[in-house]
Amino acid sequence: MSTWELETEIESYYERGEERERLTRNARGRLEFARMQDLLRRKLPGAALDVLDVGGATGAHAKWLAEDGHRVTLIDPVASQVAVAAELPGVTAVVGDARELPWDDASFDAVLLMGPLYHLTDRKYRIQAIAEAARCTRPGGVVAAATINRTAGWTDWLIFQANGIDRKISAEDGLRVLREGELRYFDQDIFTTAYLSHPGEVASEFADAGLPGAAQYAVQGFPGYIPELERLIDEPRVREHLMDGLRIIEAEPSLLGASNHLLTVANV
Ligand SMILES: C[S@@+](CC[C@H](N)C(=O)[O-])C[C@H]1O[C@@H](n2cnc3c(N)ncnc32)[C@H](O)[C@@H]1O
């Protein structure tokens, strides 16, 4: 059992259950899901692997990974989410924290951190979570982590304004997040306490956790902000063109931060 406590605000946000629909509810979520699947399928080091999904919530990724033939273990601090994930065929789910993984060294071929890093606002805890992931990964395996880019909150503020939606965030607060990264003032309307990072910060945190030279990929890329995405994403021809183009630009350094999410992948 982990000795770490999740911040109450983060826990109550996830207990509300709204995140369950995040990857299917709108075009942005569906693009994130399709791109994460596409990237992970290409970056995982083989078939029928032991995969640990840290911060796996109700198992959105654990489900398809198990269906792909991997042996999936999920860990998340929110018990109500873990109970949902535990029902998935082929998935073992436990309650716990990314900063203290209850497994021996080199227990998994791949450890995914698809959520914990952006909820750890203190750099030393993000490094600790990455180091724990690396410790539990076998040589030849990978650690992959999702982060939210620094520009995402500010861009969302502009999009909400453009759509006439008042999200109760002042322009001043929006700019503070853009400067400092820490998101900690919401009335739980949109998201919860988080840290939005620049790609270079994530790479340096990986290096400080003992994983230098990690590769980085823009997940949705700047096309994820196209207002017409909702109409376009389900047109097969457009979707294929979007996915093909994103594969071409995904690792272009000058474009990494111009994306809602970033995926950082290191070989162990
Ligand atoms: C936005 S959800 C992401 C869920 C899923 N992995 C995905 O990619 O859609 C973030 C998840 O991180 C979990 N989380 C937050 N802090 C954590 C920590 N310190 N250790 C492990 N998981 C944490 C939350 O409980 C939540 O389930």
Image (cartoon, grey):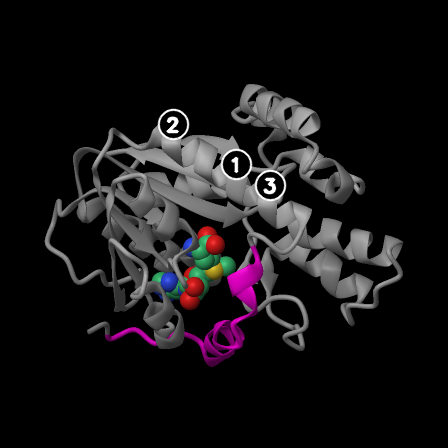
Which of 220/254 is in front?
A: 220
Above or below: residue 40 compared with residue 15 = above
Please tell me which residue is depicted at 68% across the width and 24% down the height of the picture: 237
Q: Amino acid at mark 2?
A: Arg
Disc 1 + disc 2, Cβ < 8 Å? no
- SS assignment at label 1: helix
- The residue labelled by disc 2 is 42
- The residue labelled by disc 3 is 31
Give the image location of residue 204, x and y in percent: 41, 40
| Badge 2: residue crowd in 10 Å (few <14, some 14–19, many ≥20) | few
Give the image location of residue 10, x and y in percent: 49, 73
Disc 1 + disc 3, Cβ < 8 Å? yes
- SS assignment at label 3: helix
Magenta-colored span: 3-22
Label 2 C-beta lies within 8 Å of the nearest ligand 1 atom:
no
Give the image location of residue 129, x and y in percent: 32, 55
Q: Amino acid at mark 3?
A: Leu
Mark-to-mark CA distance, 2 and 3: 17 Å
